[in-house]
Image: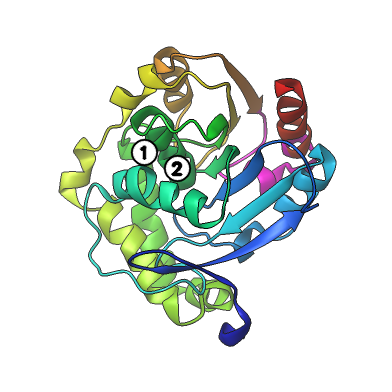
Amino acid sequence: MDDVVERLVLPNEELEYRWVGDENAEGPVLVFLHEGLGCAALWKDFPDKVAAAAGRRGLVYSRSCYGHSSYARLPRAVEFMHTEGLEILPQVLETAGIEKAILIGHSDGASISLINAGGVKDGRVQALILEAPHVFVEKFAVDAISETRETYLNTDLRKKLRRYHGLNVDNAFWGWNDIWLDPDFLEWNIEEYLPKITVPTLIIQGEGDEYGTMEQVVRTEAGIGGKIETCILPDCGHSPHNTKPEETLEAMVSFIKGLA
Protein backbone atom coordinates (compact mmCIF):
# COMPACT_ATOMS: atom_id res chain seq x y z
CA MET A 1 0.00 0.00 0.00
CA ASP A 2 2.75 2.43 0.96
CA ASP A 3 4.38 2.31 -2.49
CA VAL A 4 1.30 3.82 -4.18
CA VAL A 5 0.96 6.76 -1.78
CA GLU A 6 1.40 10.13 -3.46
CA ARG A 7 3.82 12.40 -1.66
CA LEU A 8 4.59 16.09 -1.46
CA VAL A 9 8.38 16.32 -1.31
CA LEU A 10 9.34 19.18 1.01
CA PRO A 11 12.88 20.24 1.96
CA ASN A 12 13.02 18.01 5.08
CA GLU A 13 10.09 15.60 4.80
CA GLU A 14 7.69 13.82 2.49
CA LEU A 15 3.97 14.09 3.18
CA GLU A 16 1.25 11.84 1.81
CA TYR A 17 -1.59 13.70 0.13
CA ARG A 18 -4.56 13.36 -2.16
CA TRP A 19 -6.56 15.76 -4.27
CA VAL A 20 -10.35 15.85 -4.07
CA GLY A 21 -12.98 17.62 -6.15
CA ASP A 22 -12.82 18.94 -9.70
CA GLU A 23 -9.27 19.79 -10.76
CA ASN A 24 -10.69 22.50 -13.03
CA ALA A 25 -12.79 24.13 -10.31
CA GLU A 26 -12.32 27.86 -9.81
CA GLY A 27 -11.78 29.61 -6.52
CA PRO A 28 -9.49 28.97 -3.55
CA VAL A 29 -8.40 25.39 -2.91
CA LEU A 30 -9.74 23.79 0.28
CA VAL A 31 -6.75 22.60 2.35
CA PHE A 32 -7.64 20.09 5.08
CA LEU A 33 -5.49 19.94 8.24
CA HIS A 34 -6.17 16.97 10.50
CA GLU A 35 -6.40 16.60 14.27
CA GLY A 36 -3.75 15.36 16.71
CA LEU A 37 -4.47 11.67 16.07
CA GLY A 38 -5.69 12.12 12.50
CA CYS A 39 -4.26 11.77 9.02
CA ALA A 40 -5.45 12.15 5.45
CA ALA A 41 -7.32 8.82 5.50
CA LEU A 42 -9.09 9.53 8.79
CA TRP A 43 -11.01 12.39 7.17
CA LYS A 44 -12.59 9.55 5.15
CA ASP A 45 -14.84 10.93 2.38
CA PHE A 46 -15.80 14.16 4.16
CA PRO A 47 -13.37 16.35 2.15
CA ASP A 48 -14.74 14.84 -1.07
CA LYS A 49 -18.26 15.82 -0.04
CA VAL A 50 -17.28 19.37 0.92
CA ALA A 51 -15.37 19.90 -2.32
CA ALA A 52 -18.22 18.52 -4.43
CA ALA A 53 -20.92 20.53 -2.67
CA ALA A 54 -18.89 23.74 -2.75
CA GLY A 55 -17.68 23.25 -6.31
CA ARG A 56 -14.04 23.50 -5.28
CA ARG A 57 -10.84 21.52 -5.45
CA GLY A 58 -9.34 20.27 -2.19
CA LEU A 59 -6.01 19.03 -0.84
CA VAL A 60 -5.89 16.56 2.04
CA TYR A 61 -2.49 15.74 3.56
CA SER A 62 -0.91 14.01 6.55
CA ARG A 63 1.68 15.79 8.65
CA SER A 64 5.00 14.15 9.47
CA CYS A 65 4.69 11.00 11.60
CA TYR A 66 1.04 10.52 10.59
CA GLY A 67 -0.52 8.20 8.05
CA HIS A 68 2.09 7.27 5.47
CA SER A 69 4.09 10.48 5.70
CA SER A 70 7.74 10.41 6.66
CA TYR A 71 8.97 9.89 10.22
CA ALA A 72 9.38 12.89 12.53
CA ARG A 73 11.91 12.98 15.34
CA LEU A 74 10.40 12.59 18.80
CA PRO A 75 9.76 13.95 21.34
CA ARG A 76 7.98 16.91 19.79
CA ALA A 77 8.84 20.41 20.93
CA VAL A 78 6.27 22.54 22.73
CA GLU A 79 6.31 24.79 19.65
CA PHE A 80 5.55 21.96 17.20
CA MET A 81 2.30 23.56 16.01
CA HIS A 82 4.13 26.85 15.45
CA THR A 83 6.60 25.02 13.21
CA GLU A 84 3.72 23.45 11.27
CA GLY A 85 1.90 26.75 10.80
CA LEU A 86 4.79 29.11 10.19
CA GLU A 87 7.15 26.85 8.21
CA ILE A 88 5.62 23.60 6.95
CA LEU A 89 2.20 24.79 5.78
CA PRO A 90 3.66 27.51 3.52
CA GLN A 91 5.92 24.82 2.01
CA VAL A 92 2.87 22.60 1.41
CA LEU A 93 1.05 25.41 -0.42
CA GLU A 94 4.14 26.21 -2.48
CA THR A 95 4.93 22.60 -3.39
CA ALA A 96 1.30 21.84 -4.29
CA GLY A 97 1.13 24.95 -6.47
CA ILE A 98 -1.75 26.47 -4.51
CA GLU A 99 -2.15 30.19 -5.17
CA LYS A 100 -5.29 30.74 -3.07
CA ALA A 101 -6.49 28.60 -0.17
CA ILE A 102 -9.19 28.18 2.43
CA LEU A 103 -7.75 26.33 5.42
CA ILE A 104 -10.08 23.75 7.00
CA GLY A 105 -8.48 22.64 10.26
CA HIS A 106 -9.68 20.26 12.95
CA SER A 107 -8.37 20.47 16.54
CA ASP A 108 -4.55 20.67 16.25
CA GLY A 109 -5.10 21.40 12.55
CA ALA A 110 -7.33 24.33 13.49
CA SER A 111 -4.68 25.72 15.84
CA ILE A 112 -2.04 25.36 13.12
CA SER A 113 -4.34 27.26 10.76
CA LEU A 114 -4.70 30.10 13.29
CA ILE A 115 -0.94 30.32 13.78
CA ASN A 116 -0.43 30.47 10.03
CA ALA A 117 -3.08 33.11 9.41
CA GLY A 118 -1.89 35.31 12.26
CA GLY A 119 1.84 34.70 11.95
CA VAL A 120 2.68 34.40 8.28
CA LYS A 121 0.17 36.84 6.79
CA ASP A 122 0.29 34.73 3.65
CA GLY A 123 -1.79 36.34 0.92
CA ARG A 124 -2.66 32.90 -0.42
CA VAL A 125 -4.84 32.16 2.63
CA GLN A 126 -8.27 33.64 1.96
CA ALA A 127 -10.35 32.24 4.85
CA LEU A 128 -10.36 29.81 7.79
CA ILE A 129 -12.79 27.07 8.78
CA LEU A 130 -11.98 25.81 12.27
CA GLU A 131 -13.41 22.68 13.89
CA ALA A 132 -12.86 22.52 17.66
CA PRO A 133 -9.88 24.90 17.74
CA HIS A 134 -7.81 25.33 20.88
CA VAL A 135 -5.91 28.54 21.60
CA PHE A 136 -4.75 27.69 25.14
CA VAL A 137 -4.41 24.56 27.28
CA GLU A 138 -7.19 23.58 29.68
CA LYS A 139 -6.85 21.06 32.51
CA PHE A 140 -10.09 19.61 31.14
CA ALA A 141 -8.25 18.67 27.94
CA VAL A 142 -5.15 17.37 29.69
CA ASP A 143 -7.28 15.05 31.84
CA ALA A 144 -9.06 13.72 28.76
CA ILE A 145 -5.76 13.15 26.94
CA SER A 146 -4.41 11.32 29.99
CA GLU A 147 -7.43 9.00 29.81
CA THR A 148 -6.77 8.45 26.11
CA ARG A 149 -3.26 7.29 27.04
CA GLU A 150 -4.74 4.55 29.22
CA THR A 151 -7.15 3.62 26.44
CA TYR A 152 -4.25 3.25 23.99
CA LEU A 153 -2.33 1.04 26.40
CA ASN A 154 -5.21 -1.16 27.52
CA THR A 155 -7.70 -1.49 24.65
CA ASP A 156 -7.69 -2.12 20.90
CA LEU A 157 -7.29 1.61 20.09
CA ARG A 158 -3.76 1.01 18.80
CA LYS A 159 -5.05 -1.69 16.43
CA LYS A 160 -7.74 0.65 15.12
CA LEU A 161 -5.32 3.52 14.56
CA ARG A 162 -2.80 1.23 12.87
CA ARG A 163 -5.24 0.77 9.99
CA TYR A 164 -4.69 4.42 9.12
CA HIS A 165 -1.16 5.17 10.35
CA GLY A 166 0.53 1.86 9.54
CA LEU A 167 4.09 1.74 10.88
CA ASN A 168 3.70 5.33 12.08
CA VAL A 169 1.05 4.40 14.63
CA ASP A 170 3.18 4.60 17.79
CA ASN A 171 4.99 7.70 16.61
CA ALA A 172 1.66 9.37 15.80
CA PHE A 173 0.14 8.54 19.17
CA TRP A 174 3.07 9.21 21.47
CA GLY A 175 4.15 12.29 19.53
CA TRP A 176 0.72 13.77 20.26
CA ASN A 177 0.09 12.35 23.72
CA ASP A 178 3.49 12.95 25.29
CA ILE A 179 3.68 16.63 24.37
CA TRP A 180 0.15 17.41 25.51
CA LEU A 181 0.96 15.80 28.88
CA ASP A 182 4.32 17.54 29.20
CA PRO A 183 4.15 20.02 32.15
CA ASP A 184 5.81 22.68 29.97
CA PHE A 185 2.92 22.45 27.51
CA LEU A 186 0.50 23.84 30.11
CA GLU A 187 1.79 27.31 29.21
CA TRP A 188 1.11 26.85 25.47
CA ASN A 189 -1.02 29.72 24.17
CA ILE A 190 -1.54 31.17 20.68
CA GLU A 191 -3.90 34.07 21.48
CA GLU A 192 -1.21 36.54 20.43
CA TYR A 193 -1.84 35.55 16.80
CA LEU A 194 -5.58 36.19 16.84
CA PRO A 195 -5.68 40.01 16.47
CA LYS A 196 -3.55 39.73 13.31
CA ILE A 197 -6.08 37.45 11.60
CA THR A 198 -8.15 39.52 9.16
CA VAL A 199 -9.52 36.84 6.82
CA PRO A 200 -13.14 35.61 7.25
CA THR A 201 -13.32 32.80 9.81
CA LEU A 202 -15.89 30.13 10.67
CA ILE A 203 -15.75 28.19 13.95
CA ILE A 204 -17.65 24.92 14.27
CA GLN A 205 -17.82 23.64 17.83
CA GLY A 206 -19.60 20.72 19.49
CA GLU A 207 -21.21 21.49 22.83
CA GLY A 208 -20.05 18.14 24.19
CA ASP A 209 -16.42 18.43 23.09
CA GLU A 210 -14.45 16.06 25.30
CA TYR A 211 -11.17 17.92 24.71
CA GLY A 212 -12.21 21.55 25.10
CA THR A 213 -14.77 23.83 26.71
CA MET A 214 -16.72 26.71 25.16
CA GLU A 215 -14.10 29.06 26.60
CA GLN A 216 -11.93 28.15 23.61
CA VAL A 217 -14.62 29.60 21.33
CA VAL A 218 -15.24 32.65 23.50
CA ARG A 219 -11.58 33.64 23.56
CA THR A 220 -11.09 32.94 19.85
CA GLU A 221 -14.11 35.07 18.96
CA ALA A 222 -12.89 37.89 21.20
CA GLY A 223 -9.35 37.79 19.84
CA ILE A 224 -9.73 37.48 16.07
CA GLY A 225 -9.35 40.75 14.20
CA GLY A 226 -11.51 39.91 11.18
CA LYS A 227 -15.09 38.83 10.50
CA ILE A 228 -16.00 35.66 12.40
CA GLU A 229 -19.00 33.32 12.36
CA THR A 230 -19.69 30.57 14.87
CA CYS A 231 -21.74 27.39 14.54
CA ILE A 232 -22.42 25.59 17.83
CA LEU A 233 -23.70 22.03 17.46
CA PRO A 234 -25.64 20.39 20.34
CA ASP A 235 -25.15 16.71 21.16
CA CYS A 236 -21.80 16.83 19.38
CA GLY A 237 -18.31 15.95 20.56
CA HIS A 238 -14.81 16.84 19.41
CA SER A 239 -15.27 15.78 15.77
CA PRO A 240 -18.29 17.57 14.26
CA HIS A 241 -17.58 16.20 10.77
CA ASN A 242 -17.97 12.68 12.18
CA THR A 243 -20.71 13.17 14.76
CA LYS A 244 -22.81 15.72 12.86
CA PRO A 245 -21.66 15.35 9.24
CA GLU A 246 -24.71 16.86 7.54
CA GLU A 247 -24.84 19.93 9.78
CA THR A 248 -21.07 20.41 9.52
CA LEU A 249 -21.13 20.04 5.74
CA GLU A 250 -23.97 22.54 5.44
CA ALA A 251 -22.19 25.09 7.64
CA MET A 252 -18.91 24.79 5.75
CA VAL A 253 -20.45 24.94 2.28
CA SER A 254 -22.68 27.89 3.17
CA PHE A 255 -19.64 29.76 4.49
CA ILE A 256 -17.52 28.95 1.43
CA LYS A 257 -20.23 30.02 -1.01
CA GLY A 258 -20.84 33.17 1.01
CA LEU A 259 -17.24 34.26 0.51
CA ALA A 260 -17.91 34.86 -3.17
- Residue depicted at x 47% and y 59%: 37
Q: Is residue 237 above or below residue 192?
A: below
Residue picked out by circle 2: 211
What is the quadrant of the C terminus in the image? top right
Residue picked out by circle 1: 140
Q: Is residue 193 above or below residue 178?
A: above
Which secondary structure lies at badge 1?
helix
Q: Position of residue 256 (x, y in %)?
A: 72, 30
Q: Quadrant of residue 178?
A: bottom left
Q: Which residues are magenta?
A: 233-248
Camera-side residue: 38 or 207?
38
- Name the amino acid, label 2: Tyr
- Residue depicted at x 34% and y 48%: 87
Q: Earlier in the sequence, mark 1 or mark 2?
A: 1
Q: Position of residue 147 (x, y in %)?
A: 38, 56
- Name the amino acid, label 1: Phe
Camera-side residue: 38 or 127?
127
Residue 107 located within the stretch drawn in magenta = no
